[in-house]
Image (cartoon, rainbow, N blue to C red):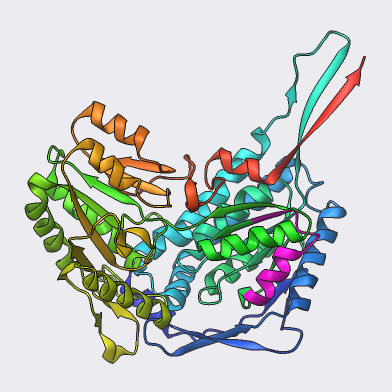
Amino acid sequence: MDQTKIDALRAQPVPDFLHLIDGKHVPASDGGTMNILSPIDGQVLTTVAKGTAADMEAAIASARAAFEDRRWAGQSPAARKKVLLKWADLIEANALELAVLGVRDNGTEIGMALKAEPGSAASTIRYYAEALDKIYGEIAPTASDILGMVHKEPVGVVGAIIPWNFPMMIGAWKLGPALAMGNSVVLKPSETASLSLMKMCDLALEAGLPPGVLNAVTGEGKVVGEVMGLSMDVDVLVFTGSGATGRRLMEYAARSNMKRVYLELGGKSPHIIFADAPNLDEAAKAAAGGIFRNSGQVCVAGSRLLVEASIHDDFVAAVVKATEAMRVGDPLKVDTTIGAVNSEIQLAQNLGFVETAQAEGGQVVTGGNRILQDTGGYYMAPTIVTGITPGATLTQKEVFGPVLGVTPFSSDDEAVQIANATVYGLAGGVWTTNLSRAHRMVRDVRTGVMHVNTYGGADGTVPLGGVGQSGNGSDKSLHAIEKYINLKTAWIKL
């Protein structure tokens, strides 16, 4: 990475952002705007349109019209592929600009942002572009005088609500398969991190996506998100975010057209370290990185560290050492390891969890406080709390911040019991050289993703989805396509 280029992009003023509806940039119907504060320094970065109910209704109507006249769904797979591949190329060509804009908006350290945001988004769009003409229908094994066929059709209008931690990456997880299958999409970015995703939508139009096929409305979830959830013209709703919002979206679906709702929600992912781990120093670094990258604002973050009792003290010391070697600071500096917390509200919530953990008997062994306050930004020291019991708040509640709770265990069965002692089931990890133990942990720990002797890094070839209150359905891989198609049977008498 070139620090000079990053600094030059950082110095550029950020224009005000408008909605994207029917291929045009339009203000809110009442002229309302929202200030966007940069977590780097707490200063106003720009404004976005503050969407109204009428704005979201207009976006949905645009998407419905685009689907009904088949301006996208009616194109050949080869034609859709060409547009999506060009879109991926444009994202890649503008990667540094997109990454810097996103960092200014949400505070992710630039090294991670460049790879996880435009880099991942481009590869995801390209993956589904290459897959779309390889999704075949089926011929059923019927009697000789019957032809049974199974067609795979686009569902129609997809509503997608995207979180603030990785807006481009997670946005692409929804947009890639939805658009590849010929659907129209209405996008609702997060109030606190929408800029890079909105810019990515502009590049889709530049690539040749027809107007109205992709619409994006910024604004408050309680206004525009509710309209999307209650709409009779949205056929599928996909969401990544909190459990509370996920429940509301399911209620909205029940109150409207019973649209399908797919949710990727919270997690309290257990990271299990056995004494026979192949390399305890490597495991300690992975444990620190698995929770503290992007200030802990990662869906699959290994926020619970379960350590075999015989190595507990030494391993915790190794994790503390790895943690204290990380550099927290300006996320647009290439030597920064951990950037800013997304917002002041999120920072206060993180610190509140630390206070609760201490009140419940936990011991802070490093961190636990706000730092770099003189910058005006939202920075928190990566925090490790030992003495966390399976019933503690830090075990049961998602922090979504740089806070790691540590719990000892004495046997395989106890490790599994503690790992499964929450309502969540998104991800997990285990370090061991015992092949049978590794397979038992993969089998017995209730998660959608289980890492063995590593943590993180699963690419787009495999699904990401949770069990329990971590959600339903899958992002990534060919399995994600299932959310965006309907199966239609043709039963033909010969």
Whether the magenta-drawn stretch holds residue 304 is answered as no
Residue 280's spot in the image, x, y percent? 13, 46
Q: Is residue 446 above or below residue 63?
A: above
Which residue lies at the image location 26% right of the left edge and 67% below the top edge? 337
Which residue lies at the image location 49% right of the left edge and 52% below the top edge? 469
Q: Is residue 338 above or below residue 145?
A: below
Whether the magenta-drawn stretch holds residue 233 is answered as yes
Magenta residue span: 222-237
Which residue lies at the image location 41% right of the left edge and 56% below the top edge? 267
Left or right of 225, for residue 166: left
- Residue 1 visible? The answer is no
| Residue sitting at the far right | 494
| Residue sitting at the far top | 144
For the C terminus, the quadrant is top right
- Residue 334 visible? The answer is yes
Residue 364's spot in the image, x, y percent? 17, 70
Residue 125's spot in the image, x, y percent? 57, 51
Which residue lies at the image location 22% right of the left edge and 75% below the top edge? 368
Q: Quadrant of residue 240?
A: bottom right
For the N terminus, the quadrant is bottom left
Residue 73's spot in the image, x, y percent? 78, 48
